[in-house]
Image: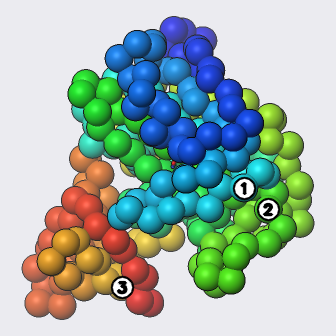
Amino acid sequence: MNDTQTMIGIKVYYFDRIDSTNEYAKSLINMVPEGTVILADQQTRGKGRHGRTWYSPADGIWMSVILRPQNVSLITVAAGVAVCETLRTVGVVPGMKWPNDIILKRKKIGGILTENVDESTIVGIGINLNMRQFPRGLKNVASSVFIETKKRLEKEMVYGILCTQLDDCYSLLKTGQTSELLTKWRHYSIMLGREVYIEAGDKKVTGRVLDISNDGALMLMCPDRRVERIIGGACHLTS
Ligand code: BTN
């Protein structure tokens, strides 16, 4: 192993309970080394994308990693691949929905929230691991590894594997091996060839997913045969 593969978790801030690991990461962003992890058993104000709250009781993995990448465009892809590889290692095979959802049996069991602050990037990772139930408003769309597989995975073990996988995926990014990373993304993607509806601010686009580009954009074939490049937004599968 070289230095680039053993950096995640170089310093760890652990909390029984915190508002949001991403918010705590912001408070120490310029004072800690790259690879610092903020890990919590529970979050009281976990944050999801698009200003949503993220349900974060005990029994999940809630963590943020502080990184300083040269190029931020594939960071969310790298983190998503690391989560999928981690779960595969313990016998669970999830899928990825662009840009940040981890899916198991059609339900969301994890997500990535990437925030750029100054020269740093905070990669927030949530994995619904051992929860047995979800609030009424969530249970049609969200689930946990336990609910879907009846496997109760030890949190510390999954966290350890995840740090190793994050090191590996981040190392691929830093050494310019992005095609290897994108190949892994394609392997886990549940989107290739599917029809989608994307909402990006005022813009609404429908189309069939062709691929992911070298910088993490989603490539769509629109009904009028134009190829559209989507760099962000909320994505809904319609086929
Ligand atoms: C999403 O899919 O909307 C992103 C969810 C990200 C949740 C994680 S849990 C750890 C970190 N801290 C937060 O407040 N959010 C992220």
- CA–CA distance in space, label 2 to label 3: 31 Å
- Lower sequence index among marks 2 and 1: 1
* Residue 224 image point, x, y percent: 11, 90
Q: Could you classify mark 2 by the number of other residues whose Cα lies within 10 Å: few (under 14), some (14-19), or many (20 or more)?
A: some
Q: Where is residue 236 in the image (x, y as percent from the top left)?
A: 40, 80
The answer to which of marks 2 and 3 sits earlier in the sequence is 2
Q: Residue at x 17, y 65 (%)?
A: 229
Q: How dense is the environment of label 3, judged by Cα within 10 Å: few (below 14), some, or many (20 and up)?
A: some
The kind of residue tagged 2 is Met
Q: Which amino acid does label 3 sit on?
A: Glu
Query: Viewer-proximal residue, 157 or 116?
Result: 116
Task: Give me the residue at 84% from left, 68% from top.
Answer: 132
Mark 2–mark 3 contact, CB under 8 Å? Answer: no
User: Which of the two labelled residues, at mark 3 and mark 1, occupies the earlier sequence position?
Assistant: 1
User: Depth-wise, is mark 2 or mark 3 nearer the camera?
Assistant: 2
User: Image height check: is 174 above or below 124?
Assistant: above
